[in-house]
Image: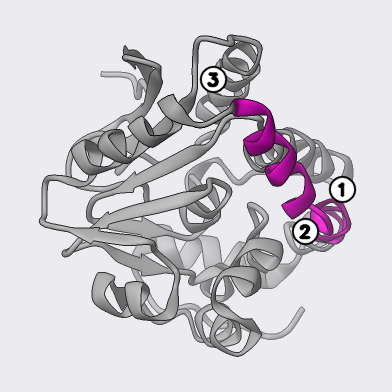
């Protein structure tokens, strides 16, 4: 059966719920799903009847992050094009006039951490886990993490997450400010929708302008990320990290 990753969309009052739906692949952020998210967000942005967006993943995980099997940039131009699209999504979320709430169950890994942090609020279940192990596949953090993570938890804690790639649980994530609300397992989506109701009685223009101001510095971070990651895609270490991951073995890196 072919792999079909879809983005489900439904209305709940003035809130739109977007669900990344491919539990068989742990809701990996393939390029087709990124395209679908860009198309949905651009359409929603112009709909005045929408006051908030909730983003979640189907099944028991939020997302396993980038689809490693699809990381096949053959040259620098291909790598830069990949990030042109990804950064279009990141900019749409961070600069959107609509408040965005991420509802996280289970694992939120790699680029999925950046996806969640591109929103304004993160609601996570008590059994959620967050990890940024980019170094294990020879890459730097992407999806805007270099901008959003230090702003959320401070540069010192962000260094620990990004450099060591160790998972942290929801309780620690709440303590350091990575998430905003911890709820019982299985209730993150309901809690996120409930929180989105607060925007029904909030003027939309101040929300939009506040988000615009808080996005200062984003573009410079994304430009650096695009240059660095596009180059790293072509390294031997990235090829080794990707092969090791797919073959389920420890990688052997040589710094080239």
Sequence-wise, the earlier of marks 2 and 3 is: 3
Q: Residues within 10 Å of mark 2 (few under 14, many from 20)?
A: some
Q: Secondary structure at mark 2?
A: loop
Numbered-mark total = 3
Q: CA distance from mark 1 to mark 2?
A: 7 Å
151 vs 212, nearest the viewer:
212
81 vs 156, nearest the viewer:
156
Q: Magenta: predominant secondary structure element?
A: helix
Q: Which mark, residue 76? A: 1
Q: CA distance from mark 3 to mark 1?
A: 24 Å
- According to the picture, the residue beneath numbered tag 3 turns out to be 36
Image position of 41 with respect to 94: above or below: above
Whether residue 65 appears in this view of the structure is no
Name the residue located 88 percent from the left edge and 58 percent from the top edge.
220
Name the residue located 79 percent from the left edge and 37 percent from the top edge.
84
The quadrant in which residue 193 appears is top left
How is the structure coloured here? Answer: one colour
Q: Residues within 10 Å of mark 1 (few under 14, many from 20)?
A: some
The region drawn magenta spans 204-227
The quadrant in which residue 124 appears is bottom left
């Amino acid at each position: 059966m072919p792999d079909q990753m879809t983005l489900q969309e439904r209305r709940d009052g003035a809130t739109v719920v977007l669900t990344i739906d491919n539990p068989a692949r742990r809701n990996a952020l393939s390029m087709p799903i990124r395209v679908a998210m860009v198309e949905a967000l651009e359409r929603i942005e112009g709909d005045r009847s929408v006051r908030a967006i909730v983003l979640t993943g189907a099944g028991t995980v939020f997302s396993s992050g980038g689809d490693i099997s699809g990381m096949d940039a053959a040259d620098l131009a291909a790598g830069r094009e990949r990030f042109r699209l990804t950064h279009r999504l990141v900019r749409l979320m961070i600069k959107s006039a609509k408040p965005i709430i991420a509802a996280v169950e289970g694992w939120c890994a790699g680029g999925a951490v950046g996806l969640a942090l591109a929103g304004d609020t993160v609601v996570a279940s008590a059994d959620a886990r967050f990890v940024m192990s980019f170094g294990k596949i020879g890459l730097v953090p992407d999806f805007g993490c270099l901008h959003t993570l230090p702003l959320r938890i401070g540069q010192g804690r962000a260094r620990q997450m990004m450099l060591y790639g160790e998972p942290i649980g929801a309780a620690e994530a709440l303590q350091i400010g990575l998430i905003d609300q911890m709820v019982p397992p299985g209730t993150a989506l309901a809690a996120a929708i409930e929180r989105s109701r607060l925007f029904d009685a909030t003027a939309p223009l101040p929300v939009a302008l506040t988000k615009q101001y808080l996005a200062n510095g984003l573009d410079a971070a994304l430009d650096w990320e695009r240059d660095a990651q596009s180059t790293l895609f072509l390294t031997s270490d990235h090829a080794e990290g990707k092969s090791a991951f797919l073959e389920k073995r420890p990688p052997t890196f040589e710094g080239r």
